[in-house]
Image (cartoon, grey):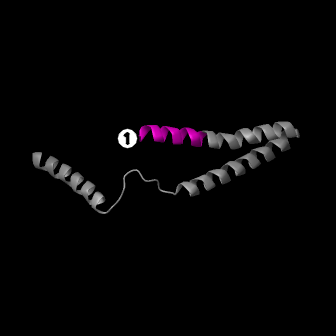
Amino acid sequence: MAKKRKQRTGAKTNATSGAAEAGLQKNVGWIPPATGIKINTLVSIVLALFVGWQTFQQTGDIAITLRLALVAGGSIWLVFALVLTLTKFLRRK
């Protein structure tokens, strides 16, 4: 039983050292920041247009339509900013 535990922990340390030897970094994002901003912009614009279109069909009032479209598009950026702030807080050195 003790040998199995040692083998398991040995495998973990070997995998960790192998990743370090390969030059892999631990806290690197999977997409570049510029691409993330472009995707976020596209998603927020599409959501704002969709919400605006649906609201205008239901109410016919342009003021309500613009307000809800801005809230929907802005909510994407609000969530992005909160997650970015939380990530920077948790990954500080």
Relative to 63, residue 27 above or below: below
Q: Which residue is mark 1?
A: 93
Q: In this picture, which residue range is highlighted in magenta? A: 79-93
Residue 43: horizontal and vertical position, in percent?
66, 51
Residue 3: horizontal and vertical position, in percent?
11, 49
What amino acid is found at the position of numbered circle 1 in the picture?
A: Lys
Closest to the observer, 11 or 87: 87
In the current view of this chain or complex, which residue is farthest to the right? 60
In the current view of this chain or complex, which residue is farthest to the bottom? 22
Circle 1: element type: loop
Residue at image location 84% in from the left, 40% down from the top = 58
Q: Main secondary structure of the magenta part?
A: helix
Could you tell whether 81 is left or right of 22 in the image?
Answer: right
Residue 61: horizontal and vertical position, in percent?
88, 38
Could you tell whether 59 is left or right of 35 in the image?
Answer: right
Residue at image location 79% in from the left, 44% down from the top = 52
